[in-house]
Image: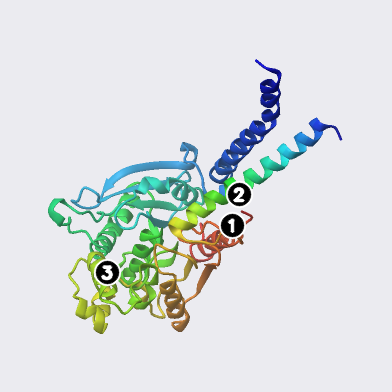
Amino acid sequence: MTLTQKRLVILFIIALIAFVMGRLAVRAMMNLLIGGTLFGGNFL
Amino acid sequence: MSGTVKEKRVKTVPIWMGILTFALAFGAGVASKFVIQPGWAKEYSVAWSDALGTRRIDLPYGDGEANKFDLYLPADSGKENYGLVVYLHAGGFTAGDKSGDVEMLSWLCKKGYVAAGVNYTLFAELEGGATNGASVLTQSEEIRNAIPKVIEAAQKEGYPIDSMAIAGGSAGHALAMIYAYRDAGQSPISVKMTFGAVGPSCFYREDWDNYGFDRETEESYQGAAGIFSAMLGELLSVEEIKDGSYLEKMKPISAAEWITPDAPPTVVAYGVHDRVQPFKASVRLKAALEKNGVDFQYFEMPHSGHGLQNDHALYKQWMETVDEYLDSYMPVK
Protein backbone atom coordinates (compact mmCIF):
# COMPACT_ATOMS: atom_id res chain seq x y z
CA MET A 1 0.00 0.00 0.00
CA THR A 2 1.43 3.34 -1.00
CA LEU A 3 1.64 6.30 1.36
CA THR A 4 -1.19 8.06 -0.51
CA GLN A 5 -3.42 5.02 -0.20
CA LYS A 6 -2.71 4.84 3.52
CA ARG A 7 -3.59 8.50 3.89
CA LEU A 8 -6.85 8.03 2.01
CA VAL A 9 -7.82 5.13 4.27
CA ILE A 10 -7.08 7.25 7.35
CA LEU A 11 -9.15 10.12 5.92
CA PHE A 12 -12.04 7.74 5.27
CA ILE A 13 -11.91 6.44 8.86
CA ILE A 14 -11.77 10.02 10.19
CA ALA A 15 -14.79 10.95 8.03
CA LEU A 16 -16.76 7.94 9.24
CA ILE A 17 -16.03 8.65 12.91
CA ALA A 18 -16.83 12.35 12.47
CA PHE A 19 -20.12 11.57 10.69
CA VAL A 20 -21.21 9.26 13.52
CA MET A 21 -20.12 11.83 16.11
CA GLY A 22 -22.15 14.51 14.31
CA ARG A 23 -25.27 12.39 14.53
CA LEU A 24 -24.56 11.50 18.16
CA ALA A 25 -24.04 15.18 18.99
CA VAL A 26 -27.52 16.05 17.70
CA ARG A 27 -29.01 13.11 19.58
CA ALA A 28 -27.21 14.17 22.76
CA MET A 29 -28.44 17.75 22.37
CA MET A 30 -32.03 16.61 21.76
CA ASN A 31 -31.84 14.28 24.76
CA LEU A 32 -30.60 17.12 26.91
CA LEU A 33 -33.60 19.24 25.93
CA ILE A 34 -36.44 16.72 25.82
CA GLY A 35 -35.02 13.52 27.32
CA GLY A 36 -33.80 10.26 25.86
CA THR A 37 -30.88 7.84 25.87
CA LEU A 38 -27.67 8.32 23.90
CA PHE A 39 -27.63 4.72 22.64
CA GLY A 40 -30.30 2.18 21.79
CA GLY A 41 -33.44 2.47 19.74
CA ASN A 42 -32.99 3.45 16.14
CA PHE A 43 -29.34 3.39 15.06
CA LEU A 44 -27.73 6.67 16.20
CA MET B 1 12.09 30.33 2.18
CA SER B 2 14.47 27.82 3.66
CA GLY B 3 14.20 24.17 2.78
CA THR B 4 13.41 23.17 6.39
CA VAL B 5 10.38 25.48 6.67
CA LYS B 6 9.03 24.30 3.32
CA GLU B 7 9.48 20.70 4.40
CA LYS B 8 7.60 21.37 7.66
CA ARG B 9 4.68 22.93 5.76
CA VAL B 10 4.47 19.97 3.42
CA LYS B 11 4.42 17.63 6.42
CA THR B 12 1.48 19.49 8.06
CA VAL B 13 -0.72 19.27 4.94
CA PRO B 14 -2.06 15.77 5.78
CA ILE B 15 -2.89 16.95 9.32
CA TRP B 16 -4.91 19.89 7.99
CA MET B 17 -6.58 17.57 5.49
CA GLY B 18 -7.59 15.34 8.40
CA ILE B 19 -9.00 18.25 10.39
CA LEU B 20 -10.94 19.54 7.37
CA THR B 21 -12.32 16.05 6.64
CA PHE B 22 -13.40 15.69 10.26
CA ALA B 23 -15.16 19.07 10.25
CA LEU B 24 -16.97 18.42 6.97
CA ALA B 25 -18.05 14.90 7.93
CA PHE B 26 -19.17 16.08 11.38
CA GLY B 27 -21.30 18.78 9.72
CA ALA B 28 -22.74 16.21 7.32
CA GLY B 29 -23.60 13.96 10.28
CA VAL B 30 -25.41 16.81 12.03
CA ALA B 31 -27.30 17.76 8.86
CA SER B 32 -28.23 14.13 8.13
CA LYS B 33 -29.96 13.88 11.49
CA PHE B 34 -32.35 16.66 10.45
CA VAL B 35 -32.69 15.95 6.73
CA ILE B 36 -32.91 12.16 6.49
CA GLN B 37 -36.25 10.80 7.65
CA PRO B 38 -37.26 7.13 7.59
CA GLY B 39 -39.06 6.21 4.37
CA TRP B 40 -42.21 5.05 6.18
CA ALA B 41 -42.62 8.44 7.92
CA LYS B 42 -43.50 10.06 4.59
CA GLU B 43 -46.72 8.04 4.47
CA TYR B 44 -48.06 9.88 7.52
CA SER B 45 -46.66 13.27 6.63
CA VAL B 46 -48.46 14.45 3.51
CA ALA B 47 -47.79 17.79 1.82
CA TRP B 48 -51.00 19.66 1.09
CA SER B 49 -52.08 19.97 -2.53
CA ASP B 50 -55.37 20.97 -4.10
CA ALA B 51 -55.66 17.43 -5.46
CA LEU B 52 -56.38 16.29 -1.88
CA GLY B 53 -59.44 18.53 -1.54
CA THR B 54 -60.35 21.99 -0.31
CA ARG B 55 -59.10 23.98 2.67
CA ARG B 56 -60.99 26.62 4.60
CA ILE B 57 -58.58 28.63 6.73
CA ASP B 58 -59.24 30.67 9.91
CA LEU B 59 -62.94 30.01 10.30
CA PRO B 60 -64.12 31.60 13.57
CA TYR B 61 -65.71 29.67 16.44
CA GLY B 62 -65.71 32.38 19.12
CA ASP B 63 -64.89 35.99 19.88
CA GLY B 64 -61.28 35.43 20.94
CA GLU B 65 -58.49 36.29 18.55
CA ALA B 66 -57.27 32.68 18.64
CA ASN B 67 -60.72 31.15 18.29
CA LYS B 68 -60.20 29.97 14.72
CA PHE B 69 -60.01 26.64 12.97
CA ASP B 70 -58.95 25.25 9.61
CA LEU B 71 -61.09 22.74 7.79
CA TYR B 72 -59.62 20.19 5.39
CA LEU B 73 -62.36 18.80 3.13
CA PRO B 74 -61.57 15.68 1.09
CA ALA B 75 -61.78 15.78 -2.70
CA ASP B 76 -64.60 13.22 -2.83
CA SER B 77 -67.58 15.38 -1.84
CA GLY B 78 -70.32 12.97 -2.91
CA LYS B 79 -70.65 10.83 0.23
CA GLU B 80 -73.68 10.77 2.48
CA ASN B 81 -71.65 11.21 5.67
CA TYR B 82 -68.08 11.84 6.75
CA GLY B 83 -65.94 11.19 9.78
CA LEU B 84 -64.34 14.22 11.40
CA VAL B 85 -60.85 14.11 12.93
CA VAL B 86 -59.90 17.11 15.06
CA TYR B 87 -56.16 17.49 15.64
CA LEU B 88 -54.94 19.92 18.33
CA HIS B 89 -51.49 21.46 18.07
CA ALA B 90 -48.59 21.13 20.51
CA GLY B 91 -46.70 23.95 22.19
CA GLY B 92 -46.82 23.59 25.98
CA PHE B 93 -50.14 25.50 26.19
CA THR B 94 -48.13 28.67 25.55
CA ALA B 95 -47.13 28.42 21.88
CA GLY B 96 -47.89 26.68 18.59
CA ASP B 97 -50.45 27.02 15.85
CA LYS B 98 -52.72 24.78 13.79
CA SER B 99 -50.55 25.59 10.77
CA GLY B 100 -47.85 23.40 12.33
CA ASP B 101 -49.97 20.30 11.72
CA VAL B 102 -50.62 20.72 8.00
CA GLU B 103 -48.92 17.42 7.16
CA MET B 104 -50.90 15.42 9.72
CA LEU B 105 -54.18 17.12 8.73
CA SER B 106 -53.40 16.52 5.04
CA TRP B 107 -52.78 12.82 5.77
CA LEU B 108 -56.15 12.56 7.51
CA CYS B 109 -57.85 14.40 4.65
CA LYS B 110 -56.13 12.10 2.15
CA LYS B 111 -57.59 9.14 4.03
CA GLY B 112 -61.07 10.59 3.35
CA TYR B 113 -61.83 12.35 6.65
CA VAL B 114 -62.86 15.91 7.20
CA ALA B 115 -59.88 17.11 9.25
CA ALA B 116 -59.83 20.16 11.48
CA GLY B 117 -56.98 22.00 13.18
CA VAL B 118 -58.28 24.16 16.01
CA ASN B 119 -56.40 27.01 17.69
CA TYR B 120 -56.99 27.98 21.31
CA THR B 121 -56.00 31.00 23.40
CA LEU B 122 -52.45 30.45 24.58
CA PHE B 123 -51.29 31.20 28.10
CA ALA B 124 -49.25 34.41 28.18
CA GLU B 125 -47.67 36.56 30.88
CA LEU B 126 -48.34 40.26 30.59
CA GLU B 127 -46.30 43.16 31.94
CA GLY B 128 -46.26 43.38 35.71
CA GLY B 129 -46.58 39.63 36.21
CA ALA B 130 -50.27 39.42 35.27
CA THR B 131 -51.49 36.80 32.82
CA ASN B 132 -53.97 36.91 29.95
CA GLY B 133 -56.29 34.60 31.89
CA ALA B 134 -55.74 31.60 29.65
CA SER B 135 -55.21 28.23 31.30
CA VAL B 136 -55.56 24.58 30.38
CA LEU B 137 -59.08 24.81 31.77
CA THR B 138 -60.11 27.75 29.53
CA GLN B 139 -58.38 26.10 26.57
CA SER B 140 -60.34 22.88 27.12
CA GLU B 141 -63.55 24.92 27.32
CA GLU B 142 -62.68 26.66 24.06
CA ILE B 143 -62.18 23.29 22.38
CA ARG B 144 -65.52 22.10 23.75
CA ASN B 145 -67.18 25.21 22.29
CA ALA B 146 -65.37 24.82 18.99
CA ILE B 147 -66.51 21.29 18.12
CA PRO B 148 -70.18 22.12 17.33
CA LYS B 149 -68.97 25.03 15.14
CA VAL B 150 -66.56 22.77 13.28
CA ILE B 151 -69.31 20.25 12.61
CA GLU B 152 -71.67 23.04 11.52
CA ALA B 153 -69.07 24.51 9.15
CA ALA B 154 -68.42 21.10 7.57
CA GLN B 155 -72.16 20.60 7.11
CA LYS B 156 -72.41 24.03 5.43
CA GLU B 157 -69.68 23.00 3.01
CA GLY B 158 -71.69 19.90 2.09
CA TYR B 159 -69.86 17.40 4.32
CA PRO B 160 -72.33 16.05 6.92
CA ILE B 161 -70.48 14.58 9.92
CA ASP B 162 -71.70 11.40 11.62
CA SER B 163 -68.68 10.40 13.72
CA MET B 164 -65.57 12.02 15.10
CA ALA B 165 -62.16 11.41 16.61
CA ILE B 166 -60.09 13.90 18.55
CA ALA B 167 -56.31 13.86 18.69
CA GLY B 168 -53.26 15.97 19.31
CA GLY B 169 -49.62 16.23 20.22
CA SER B 170 -48.27 17.11 23.69
CA ALA B 171 -50.41 20.00 24.99
CA GLY B 172 -52.85 19.31 22.16
CA HIS B 173 -52.96 15.68 23.24
CA ALA B 174 -53.81 16.72 26.81
CA LEU B 175 -56.69 18.86 25.49
CA ALA B 176 -57.82 16.08 23.14
CA MET B 177 -57.95 13.60 26.05
CA ILE B 178 -59.89 16.07 28.20
CA TYR B 179 -62.47 16.39 25.44
CA ALA B 180 -62.59 12.64 24.81
CA TYR B 181 -62.96 11.63 28.46
CA ARG B 182 -64.61 14.67 30.11
CA ASP B 183 -66.69 16.31 27.37
CA ALA B 184 -67.58 13.54 24.92
CA GLY B 185 -71.01 13.25 26.56
CA GLN B 186 -71.77 16.80 25.45
CA SER B 187 -70.45 16.32 21.95
CA PRO B 188 -73.04 16.77 19.19
CA ILE B 189 -71.45 13.79 17.42
CA SER B 190 -70.33 10.52 18.96
CA VAL B 191 -66.58 10.45 19.74
CA LYS B 192 -65.38 7.14 18.29
CA MET B 193 -61.74 7.30 19.33
CA THR B 194 -58.88 9.46 20.50
CA PHE B 195 -55.18 9.33 19.77
CA GLY B 196 -52.10 11.31 20.52
CA ALA B 197 -48.69 11.45 22.09
CA VAL B 198 -46.96 12.80 25.17
CA GLY B 199 -49.90 14.71 26.65
CA PRO B 200 -50.00 15.16 30.45
CA SER B 201 -53.07 13.36 31.77
CA CYS B 202 -52.96 13.95 35.54
CA PHE B 203 -51.22 15.98 38.22
CA TYR B 204 -50.08 13.74 41.05
CA ARG B 205 -47.14 15.66 42.49
CA GLU B 206 -45.07 12.51 42.96
CA ASP B 207 -45.33 11.76 39.23
CA TRP B 208 -43.85 15.13 38.28
CA ASP B 209 -40.30 14.15 39.20
CA ASN B 210 -39.01 15.67 35.97
CA TYR B 211 -39.58 19.05 37.68
CA GLY B 212 -38.53 17.81 41.13
CA PHE B 213 -42.06 18.08 42.52
CA ASP B 214 -41.78 14.61 44.06
CA ARG B 215 -39.39 15.92 46.72
CA GLU B 216 -40.64 16.77 50.18
CA THR B 217 -39.17 20.28 50.26
CA GLU B 218 -40.71 23.73 50.50
CA GLU B 219 -39.22 24.64 47.12
CA SER B 220 -40.84 21.59 45.55
CA TYR B 221 -44.26 22.40 47.05
CA GLN B 222 -44.00 26.00 45.85
CA GLY B 223 -42.94 24.91 42.38
CA ALA B 224 -45.87 22.52 42.09
CA ALA B 225 -48.29 25.16 43.40
CA GLY B 226 -46.97 27.67 40.85
CA ILE B 227 -47.16 25.46 37.77
CA PHE B 228 -50.38 23.67 38.67
CA SER B 229 -52.06 27.02 39.51
CA ALA B 230 -51.07 28.42 36.12
CA MET B 231 -52.38 25.32 34.35
CA LEU B 232 -55.65 25.33 36.26
CA GLY B 233 -56.11 29.12 36.16
CA GLU B 234 -56.81 29.18 39.88
CA LEU B 235 -54.48 29.87 42.78
CA LEU B 236 -53.50 26.72 44.67
CA SER B 237 -51.86 27.10 48.07
CA VAL B 238 -48.75 25.30 49.23
CA GLU B 239 -50.91 23.77 51.97
CA GLU B 240 -53.25 22.27 49.35
CA ILE B 241 -50.25 20.81 47.57
CA LYS B 242 -48.92 19.36 50.82
CA ASP B 243 -52.16 17.73 51.95
CA GLY B 244 -53.14 16.56 48.44
CA SER B 245 -56.47 18.41 48.40
CA TYR B 246 -55.34 20.20 45.20
CA LEU B 247 -55.99 17.00 43.24
CA GLU B 248 -59.76 17.42 43.42
CA LYS B 249 -59.38 21.00 42.14
CA MET B 250 -57.18 19.76 39.28
CA LYS B 251 -59.77 17.20 38.20
CA PRO B 252 -61.34 19.40 35.46
CA ILE B 253 -58.02 19.28 33.57
CA SER B 254 -56.95 15.76 34.62
CA ALA B 255 -58.04 13.65 31.67
CA ALA B 256 -57.17 10.32 33.33
CA GLU B 257 -59.57 11.09 36.18
CA TRP B 258 -62.51 11.18 33.75
CA ILE B 259 -61.99 7.73 32.25
CA THR B 260 -65.02 5.48 32.58
CA PRO B 261 -65.97 2.22 30.84
CA ASP B 262 -67.66 4.44 28.21
CA ALA B 263 -64.43 6.24 27.30
CA PRO B 264 -63.63 6.09 23.58
CA PRO B 265 -60.97 3.71 22.23
CA THR B 266 -57.55 5.22 22.73
CA VAL B 267 -54.11 5.03 21.12
CA VAL B 268 -51.31 6.83 22.97
CA ALA B 269 -47.52 7.00 22.92
CA TYR B 270 -45.10 8.22 25.60
CA GLY B 271 -41.34 8.50 25.99
CA VAL B 272 -39.87 6.90 29.11
CA HIS B 273 -37.24 9.65 29.49
CA ASP B 274 -39.59 12.58 28.88
CA ARG B 275 -38.27 15.75 30.53
CA VAL B 276 -41.18 17.98 29.54
CA GLN B 277 -44.14 16.07 30.90
CA PRO B 278 -44.06 13.29 33.50
CA PHE B 279 -43.82 9.78 32.10
CA LYS B 280 -45.18 8.40 35.39
CA ALA B 281 -48.50 10.16 34.73
CA SER B 282 -48.85 8.12 31.56
CA VAL B 283 -48.49 4.92 33.59
CA ARG B 284 -51.45 6.13 35.66
CA LEU B 285 -53.37 6.83 32.43
CA LYS B 286 -52.65 3.29 31.25
CA ALA B 287 -53.86 1.88 34.57
CA ALA B 288 -57.11 3.87 34.33
CA LEU B 289 -57.74 2.64 30.77
CA GLU B 290 -57.05 -0.95 31.86
CA LYS B 291 -59.22 -0.69 34.97
CA ASN B 292 -62.19 0.59 32.95
CA GLY B 293 -61.86 -1.98 30.19
CA VAL B 294 -61.33 0.62 27.46
CA ASP B 295 -60.03 -0.65 24.12
CA PHE B 296 -56.63 1.01 24.09
CA GLN B 297 -53.07 0.72 22.80
CA TYR B 298 -50.28 2.20 24.87
CA PHE B 299 -46.84 2.64 23.32
CA GLU B 300 -43.88 3.11 25.62
CA MET B 301 -40.75 4.36 23.87
CA PRO B 302 -37.84 3.11 26.02
CA HIS B 303 -35.08 5.30 24.55
CA SER B 304 -37.04 8.50 23.85
CA GLY B 305 -38.10 11.69 25.51
CA HIS B 306 -40.85 14.17 24.67
CA GLY B 307 -40.15 13.97 20.93
CA LEU B 308 -40.38 10.15 20.74
CA GLN B 309 -37.22 10.73 18.74
CA ASN B 310 -35.09 7.64 19.41
CA ASP B 311 -37.49 4.76 18.73
CA HIS B 312 -38.37 4.81 15.05
CA ALA B 313 -39.53 1.19 14.93
CA LEU B 314 -42.01 1.73 17.78
CA TYR B 315 -43.07 5.10 16.35
CA LYS B 316 -43.92 3.33 13.11
CA GLN B 317 -45.95 0.73 15.02
CA TRP B 318 -47.76 3.54 16.84
CA MET B 319 -48.73 5.29 13.62
CA GLU B 320 -49.79 2.00 12.03
CA THR B 321 -51.99 1.34 15.07
CA VAL B 322 -53.53 4.82 14.80
CA ASP B 323 -54.25 4.04 11.17
CA GLU B 324 -55.81 0.67 12.08
CA TYR B 325 -57.96 2.16 14.84
CA LEU B 326 -59.20 4.89 12.50
CA ASP B 327 -60.07 2.27 9.88
CA SER B 328 -61.78 0.14 12.48
CA TYR B 329 -63.73 2.74 14.48
CA MET B 330 -64.25 5.35 11.78
CA PRO B 331 -64.21 3.46 8.48
CA VAL B 332 -64.31 5.74 5.45
CA LYS B 333 -67.47 4.70 3.65
- Secondary structure of the residue carrying numbered label 3: helix
Labels 1 and 2 touching (C-beta < 8 A): yes
- Secondary structure of the residue carrying numbered label 2: loop
Q: Residue B83's image quarter?
A: bottom left
Tell me the amino acid under the disc marked 3.
Answer: Gly
**Label 1 to label 3, Cα distance in Å?**
34 Å
Tell me the amino acid under the disc marked 1.
Answer: His
Tell me the amino acid under the disc marked 2.
Answer: Pro
Chain under numbered label 2: B
Near-viewer residue (B211 or B325):
B211
**Label 1 to label 2, Cα distance in Å?**
8 Å
- Secondary structure of the residue carrying numbered label 1: helix
> Which residue position holds label 1?
B312
Which label was assigned to residue B223?
3
Labels 1 and 3 touching (C-beta < 8 A): no
**Label 3 to label 2, Cα distance in Å?**
39 Å
Residue B313 shown left or right of residue B85 in the figure: right
